[in-house]
Image: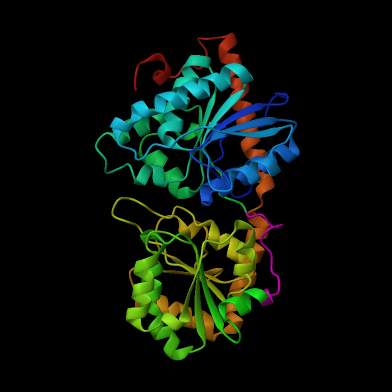
């Protein structure tokens, strides 16, 4: 099958109809937990179930707000079971703690007669998935967002477990080119890989007049507004943006920098703003409801997230916030790091800048804040691009077809066990 913009999709059109599919999905967390990968899964599956007569069960953990979310989202074809407990870290001695989860997942497989398994996280869901695949001959699809590879590269034992999991998956969906390249680098055959970047929900993200109550709440009357929507962690680059702001404020004195999100770096960033003497221009909005993110995009003149690569391999592998802000018609600035070049077309929909260079970031900010025509044209180009290339329905169709082909292939192998046996399944390699 060919999906526009996805040269790395290797599946061919299905020969026949697999009928309705029964999906079992395991993920460390799910909405309403914030995070790009969780939004990715929710939109994929929501669109898939809207188009096909399939059913789906998600096994995940409890997060704040889960009861109301589950009550609203649960239906005849979709349900969420929250009993998983995430591992505190990815150290190898934590693996025995995954055994109770495996037992619970196995019980669901036995009770549900599922056609396939989707694993949204590497540890322990992916490792448990390999066991379920072998125990129940349940075809397994893994997702990879890129940081699963980069963050484990420098570890002693984790790469071995990581590679074992990916080699035993029937199919792997890379959520961006950064993830795809990482999987190829560690030796995963390309005929098992498919690339499906995140889409944008155009019913949720669209241009609209700024909300007057938010303008009054944050004192934005008559101001130029710079916005970041991201957790306050080092790789999101809040610190370098604050370093750049004094240069920008000298030329754009009515600038306000609105930061939406919480995280461990919050107190240090507030202290940094005070030390730089720009505390009156920086507004810490805290965590905001997912349903209000579009309202915040519509407040700003420019969106920025100067993401950077951290020493431990923590990296922004795509950056859904950039395409969301573009969908609202806003120009964006991202860090020249990880996979953001796929989300931001440098010089067309926004700019990429060195995330360690405050002078370059200040220069790009001034270009957009002082040139309204340039900002408007980049925002318009970004909106046109995401509407043409980033719809969720095509991605949902792709993941459904990939899953159906995987199921049909597994059924053929059951009927003819000698056909399609891979070396890793026969014990030749691990």
Q: Position of residue 192 (x, y in %)?
A: 50, 32
Residue 363 versus residue 106: which sits nearer the camera? 106
- Residue 353 image-quadrant placement: bottom left
- Taking the spot 62% from the left edge, 42% from the top edge, the residue there is 67
Is residue 295 in view? yes
Residue at the farthest left position: 156
Q: Please tell me whether residue 327 belongs to the stretch shown in magenta.
A: no
Looking at the image, residue 171 lies above or below residue 138: below
- Taking the spot 59% from the left edge, 9% from the top edge, the residue there is 415
The colour scheme is rainbow
Q: Position of residue 96 (x, y in %)?
A: 34, 26
- Residue 356 image-quadrant placement: bottom left
Give the magenta part as a residue range: 200-212
- Taking the spot 44% from the left edge, 86% from the top edge, the residue there is 249
Magenta stretch secondary structure, dominant: loop
- Describe residue 411's horizontal placement relative to residue 337 as left or right: right
Residue 49 versus residue 409: which sits nearer the camera? 49
Is residue 6 in view? no
- Taking the spot 72% from the left edge, 57% from the top edge, the residue there is 203
Q: Where is residue 14 in the image (x, y as percent from the top left)?
A: 67, 28
Residue 256 versus residue 244: which sits nearer the camera? 256
For the N terminus, the image quarter is top right
């Amino acid at each position: 099958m060919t999906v526009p913009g996805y040269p790395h999709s290797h599946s061919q059109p299905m020969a026949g109809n697999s009928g309705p599919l029964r999906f079992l999905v395991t993920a460390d967390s799910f909405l309403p937990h914030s995070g790009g990968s969780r939004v990715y899964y929710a939109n994929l599956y929501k669109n898939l179930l809207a188009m096909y007569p399939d059913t789906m069960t998600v096994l995940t953990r409890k997060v704040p707000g889960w009861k109301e979310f589950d009550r609203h989202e649960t239906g005849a074809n979709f349900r969420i079971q929250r009993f998983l407990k995430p591992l505190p870290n990815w150290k190898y001695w934590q693996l025995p703690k995954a055994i109770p989860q495996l037992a619970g997942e196995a019980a669901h497989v036995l009770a549900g007669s599922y056609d396939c398994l989707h694993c949204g996280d590497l540890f322990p869901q992916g490792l448990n998935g390999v066991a379920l695949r072998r125990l129940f001959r349940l075809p397994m699809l893994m997702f990879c967002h890129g940081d699963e590879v980069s963050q484990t590269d420098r570890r002693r034992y984790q790469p071995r477990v990581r590679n074992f999991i990916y080699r035993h998956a029937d199919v792997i969906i890379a959520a961006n080119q950064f993830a795809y390249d990482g999987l190829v680098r560690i030796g995963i055959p390309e005929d098992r890989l498919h690339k499906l970047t995140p889409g944008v929900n155009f019913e949720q993200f669209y241009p609209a007049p700024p909300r007057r109550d938010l303008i009054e709440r944050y004192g934005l009357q008559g101001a130029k507004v710079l916005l970041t929507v991201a957790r306050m962690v080092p790789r999101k680059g809040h610190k370098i943006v604050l370093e750049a702001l004094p240069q920008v404020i000298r030329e754009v004195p009515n600038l306000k920098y609105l930061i939406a999100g919480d995280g461990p770096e919050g107190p240090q960033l507030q202290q940094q703003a005070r030390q730089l003497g720009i505390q009156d221009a920086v507004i810490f909005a805290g965590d905001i409801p997912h349903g209000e993110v579009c309202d915040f995009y519509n407040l700003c003149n420019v969106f920025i997230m100067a993401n950077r690569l951290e020493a431990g391999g923590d990296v922004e592998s795509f950056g859904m916030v950039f395409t969301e802000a573009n969908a609202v018609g806003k120009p964006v600035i991202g860090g020249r790091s990880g996979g953001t070049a796929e989300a931001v077309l440098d010089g067309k929909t926004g700019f990429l800048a060195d995330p360690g260079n405050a002078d370059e970031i200040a220069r790009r900010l001034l270009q957009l804040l002082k040139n309204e025509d340039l900002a408007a044209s980049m925002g318009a180009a970004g909106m046109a691009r995401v509407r043409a290339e980033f719809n969720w329905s095509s991605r949902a169709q792709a993941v459904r077809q990939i899953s159906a082909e995987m199921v049909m292939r597994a059924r053929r192998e059951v009927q003819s066990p000698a056909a399609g046996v891979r070396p890793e399944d026969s014990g030749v390699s691990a």
